[in-house]
Image (cartoon, rainbow, N blue to C red):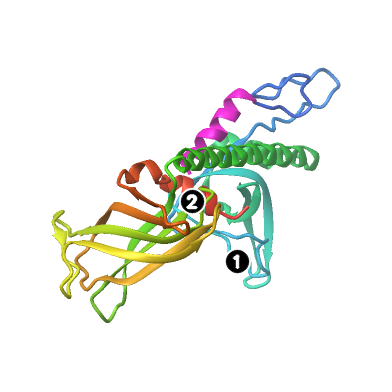
Amino acid sequence: MKIFVILILTILLASPFAYAAEEPTPHAPAAEKGKEAPYDISIIFGTVTEDDAIAGSSEPSSYCSVYSGKTLTEGAVVLISGMRACESSYPKETVPFYEILINAKPYFIQQSKVKLTETDKKRLDAMPADALSDFKEKSMAVSLYARRKQLDAAFKAIEKTSKHGLTLLNHKIYKTSEYTEGTGFSVSVSNPTKKTIKYISFTIVGYNSVKDPVSGGRKRGTSITVKGVGPIEPNRSALYDWEYMWFTDLVQTHKITSIKVEYMDGSKRTIKSIKDISLAPEIYLTMTEED
């Protein structure tokens, strides 16, 4: 989200737009005598005012509800692209929505859950249909540009890790069950080499809430090694999951200390600098978000 916001703000500062103005300006110029004033269609941002606010991927239902979209957190910055007035069939009322853009896709969220500056709200409310159309087009162009920049940054990050022979896409620990004690471990990797991976082994240490190593139990020590079976073809990825890596719920954090890769041709590689092959969480999110 930070990358997205920074990119949009950069674009905004560099390229303010005004509808019907001869030159792009941040605000609409004064009307000439006998001519209608142009409308300011510079970009508008809003701030989400509550946690778990739903932005629907389709227009509001007949009851003015939205489903199957994005769940936004309080304080999230969103790019406004328009408005919708929903006429609820029951109860009989009008519910106003904003149309927002996420990865250049439209979503709909109740206006009561998004805060705009008073100036921006008045400006948006006063826009006629033709100005709103241009406003939406301009917002879409900004959203598309920001998304391309996000993807470019992600591809560059992957390229940087590839010289080390492996890309660690994501890894996490999780509680295995509500009814038994156990902590699982999952990991996603990508093979950037020209050779097929036969086996891949991960050595992991789990830590409790006071940063002490936790034993895996059942004669396991604190340093646990698990082995994943390929094949992982060149330029392909794989997900591995071990449900009971630790037979306890005490594990709060973890660290991968080394990764060993064995290829189909018999060659091997050991990676100890895990940081060099790891994608930042926001980069992984960029790669896995739907376009």
Q: Position of residue 121 (x, y in %)?
A: 60, 40
Residue on which disc 1 sits:
65
Residue farthest toward the bottom in the current orientation of the protein: 179
Question: In this picture, is 187 found above or below 273?
Answer: below
Q: Which of the 4 image quarters holds residue 226? A: bottom left
Question: Residue at coordinates 49% horizontally, 52% vertically from top-left?
Answer: 191
Callout 2 environment at 10 Å: few (<14), some (14 to 19), or many (20+)? some
Task: Choose mark 1 or mark 2, whichever is in front.
Answer: 2
Task: Check residue 7 for magenta coloring.
Answer: yes
Name which residue type carries label 2. Leu
Q: Position of residue 265 (x, y in %)?
A: 47, 56
Q: Earlier in the sequence, mark 1 or mark 2?
A: 1
Under circle 1, the secondary element is: loop
Question: Residue at coordinates 79% horizontally, 43% vertically from top-left?
Answer: 129
Q: Which mark is residue 285?
A: 2
Task: Check residue 118 for magenta coloring.
Answer: no
Question: In this picture, is 152 found above or below 262?
Answer: above
